[in-house]
Image: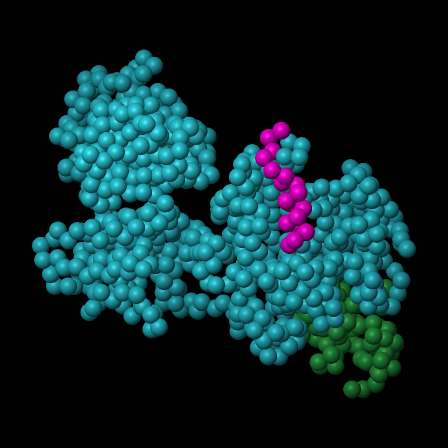
Amino acid sequence: MNKTKLILIGNGMVGHQFLASLAESGEAERFEVTIFCEEPRLAYDRVQLSAYFSGKTAEDLAMGQPAQYAAWGYHVRLNEKVVSIDRDNQTVTSSTGATLAYDQIILATGSFPFVPPVPGHDREHCLVYRTIEDLEAITASAAKGRSGVVVGGGLLGLEAAKALRDLGLETHVVEFAPRLMAVQLDDAGGKVLRDKIAELGVKVHTGKNTQQIVDGDNAVHRMEFADGEVLETDVILFSAGIRPRDELARSCGLDVGERGGIVIDNDCLTSDKNIFAIGECALWNGRIFGLVAPGYNMAKVAVARLLGEDKQFLGADMSTKLKLMGVDVASIGDAHGHTPGARNYTYLDEACGIYKKIVVNESGKQLLGAILVGDAEDYGTLLQYALNGIDLPEFPDSLILPQRGGDGKPAGLGVAALPETAQICSCHDVSKGDICQAIDGGAATLGDVKSCTKAATGCGGCSALLTNLVNHELESRGVEVNRNLCEHFDFTRQELYHLVRVDQIKSFDELLHKHGRGKGCEICKPTAASILASCWNEFVLKKPHVGLQDTNDTFLANMQKDGTYSVVPRVAGGEITPDKLIVLGQVAKQFNLYTKVTGGQRIDLFGARLEELPQIWRILVDAGFETGHAYGKSLRTVKSCVGSTWCRYGVDDSVGLAIEVENRYKGLRSPHKIKFAVSGCTRECAEAQSKDVGIIATENGWNLYLCGNGGMKPRHGDLFATDLDKDTLIKYIDRFLMFYVKTADRLQRTSVWMDNLEGGLDYLRQVIIEDSLGLGAELEEQMLQVVGTYECEWKKTIEDPEALKRFRPFVNADATDSNVVFVMERDQIRPATAAEKAANTPAVPVKMVS
Amino acid sequence: MTTNTKLISLCSKADLVPNSGVCALVDGRQVALFYLPEDEQVYAIDNHDPFGQANVLSRGIVGSIADVPVVASPLYKQRFSLVDGQCFEDEAVKLATWQVTLLDDVLMIDPTPR
């Protein structure tokens, strides 16, 4: 069968979505797909563009991956632009002169930034904000300048202002209209936003009509306004709206709108039945959609139509919620109350900078629109009211008035009231029905639902709503959301932690008698041991704690499959002297241990029998080693690259910092193991972004990444704070770790813990950086107590005859376990297999070392 | 309790660890001993973990399932009744147990498993 020749012109976010949807349909093989991309790289996330200035790289923003496209069977032509379409002969010609035949074309050419034609707009250091190349030019110009102006106070303009501020420029926003975000906000909302942004040091000038740009006296440019005022600046960014890229369509005679845009119908087809147009270049029903979600929708419609399926584009909701320079802003539906008979309710709190408005219909029963500035928590609920036509409560203003000292929100939206079709997550187009389906399919927690539907993993605006919905659905299915630790305690780990702290409980027996029942078990005992250690940091082998520990904690070593143990001394930061290395070699030789280098930059010694552990550790402690806690749910390692001391590229001393933090947090017992890494520059040789706590040196300090992990479900850490000095860095880590220890579930890694915190990363920032719970000092003090009471468990053990008694293999005989048998492989020992034991394969003789 | 004439002395009470396990050799077999002071009871079961194929059960955590005292294997966490050796995860698996008793400060055992 001949494949349909399909040409995609443009590889932006919408073009990428088209390719992904086509691949997901499983029908991509019916097409021979060629992609023309005029930029030097594949699709990337333009919505997150400003993140480029707070540490994200072009790779971080990338959406299209060459390997992925190749796997889907697509042909990509980077840096190549289509210059003409010959509709009669069905060919396209590119900037390199190549001519290709087509059966179908998808135009996804996007838009370009509108630059007002004022005299001087084309001077040097007058730039726009759309592509990564633009960002590079902005960075270069900013490096030479001191101040910058963004022309345009809309959504994109404010994003661009954030970028200039992040680059360290004195930042101004110049807006033609009398207020910021004129499309989405009203005057009162615009004023609150303006005040908030001014507080952040950005100067806002509204009602300014730029007449011309000329040479400045004290800066590169002088902007002259119609009212006679002037503003001097070094860099100018134009962000005064977008215009559709329709020149190609125009030149081949397709219908275009009066004010630009390629005319499409509900099938996303242009006036030529072989050519589709999707995204910001398309004009549907006289409208251009400058948001990504409607573009994605069009992409899905185009795929469906190509496959002969029935799907149409019928417009889109333009409600938005975003964070501009840390200020929440949201706008829903008919925010300006244009509907006849519409009535407003408003709430203004000038002290905190919060403005809320809802627009209701004449009967007061339906929500038409809303504006939220400074606090957009109600966005999800209000959007559901508006989109689904849900009846408003008797007093609609209760939806936006603050609730103080009462029983929570009396007028909150019952999730039960939502129809199955209600869209919960707009980023990933997840409906209530999709979520119910996921739960019916076995998803039993919020985390499960998130990972299988992707809901709340985009902007996160729907996470509170999603949590309510998931809990409601689970309960309605009779799933008792039982968070009890085990049959002995009707409490969660977090609650037990609290009880231990508040009641000053010092032993498991006391905890069990006061708050539990039975004898405990292998779940609650180690959990309690960990909590007691986190709180009071007593020697884990002290009598009342002995029976609580997993075998690894009891014998301070890691049990292997044959019942022998491995030994891992601490090698802080991976730095070790030759003398210490020799000691490790000597010990391994003397006790005939298998040696292996670990992923955490230490040496693991395997095959030690119970009775050998104290003897091995006596030698290690004498040589200056400490326990490495490889056996505990506790801080494991702080991995480091060699850093600025030796490396040509190093920016700071990563080894020094790694050793310092490893020594600070060693011995901290926690709900799960914790790993750190420190990299000396952005080359990231220590792989810090895959750790619970990752630290990367910058020119101005340290960037802190949190909640990454390797293992079964690898996850990159999130950039938590940038350019920290060392004291602040340590303060944040102290608070982070103690907050985790305090609130996480048993065996819950930091990543899952954060995903389950309502509000996620932002919430964590509030707690740790802004100290929103007022816990900061307490958490630091508790950490200081742990740091101050650290003792090497092995040093204590070998000095304690009672503790040593436990390392006898038999209470009534001096013998070794005859079931432990080693054979040789690659010049070292390994456990014999059952078959080898049965066949009496020559074994390594067991020596009693004394 | 009837007097068992086969009882031999095994170790002292001080050799046992409260709410935890130790191991003893009885006629060449490894026996895991658990001392629960609250019940003033000592239990003896096979030290061999039939799932992990290693002699490790004395190093497991002691607990209870609905008032039955149990030990959880340190290797793969299967739980065994200290009273009769029954595995809670696999009905077909039941460990040997021994009769033990504390006579003052000496632990006595019947060396024939039950």
In this orientation, which residue lies closer to the viewer: A358 or A467? A358
Q: Is residue A23 among what the camera can see?
A: no
Instruction: Tell me what hue chain B is rendered in.
Output: green
Of A292 and A768, which appears nearest the observer?
A768
Locate residue A305 relative to residue A624 in the image: left or right.
left
Residue A598 belongs to magenta span:
no
Residue B2 seen in this snapshot: yes
The residue most toward the left is: A340
Q: Which residue is drawn at 54% across and 57% down?
A: A735
Q: Main secondary structure of the magenta part?
A: helix
Question: Given the current orientation, which residue lies at the most extreme top position?
Answer: A97
* Chain rendered cyan: A
Could you say where residue A78 lies in the image, as x and y percent from the top left? 38, 23
Residue A454 at x, y percent in the picture: 39, 49
Residue at the spot 82% in from the left edge and 41% down from the top edge? A579
Judged left or right of residue B105, residue A334 is left
* Residue A703 left/right relative to A291: right
Residue A528 rendering spot, x and y as whole percentages = 62, 68
In the picture shown, does residue A132 fall above or below A368?
A: above
| A731 or B35, nearer to the observer | A731
Q: Magenta residues, as a range?
A: A648-665
- Residue A835 vs residue A690, the one in the foreground: A690
Instruction: Count the marks.
Output: 0
**Is A649 a magenta residue?**
yes
Compared across the picture, whether A399 is left or right of A755 comes to: left
- Percent coordinates x, y for residue A104 in the rendering: 26, 26
| Quadrant of the image containing the N terminus of chain A | top left
Residue at image position (72%, 46%) is A571
Q: In which quarter of the image is the C terminus of chain A?
A: bottom right
Kindly identify the residue that appears in the image at 85 percent across and 75 percent down: B12
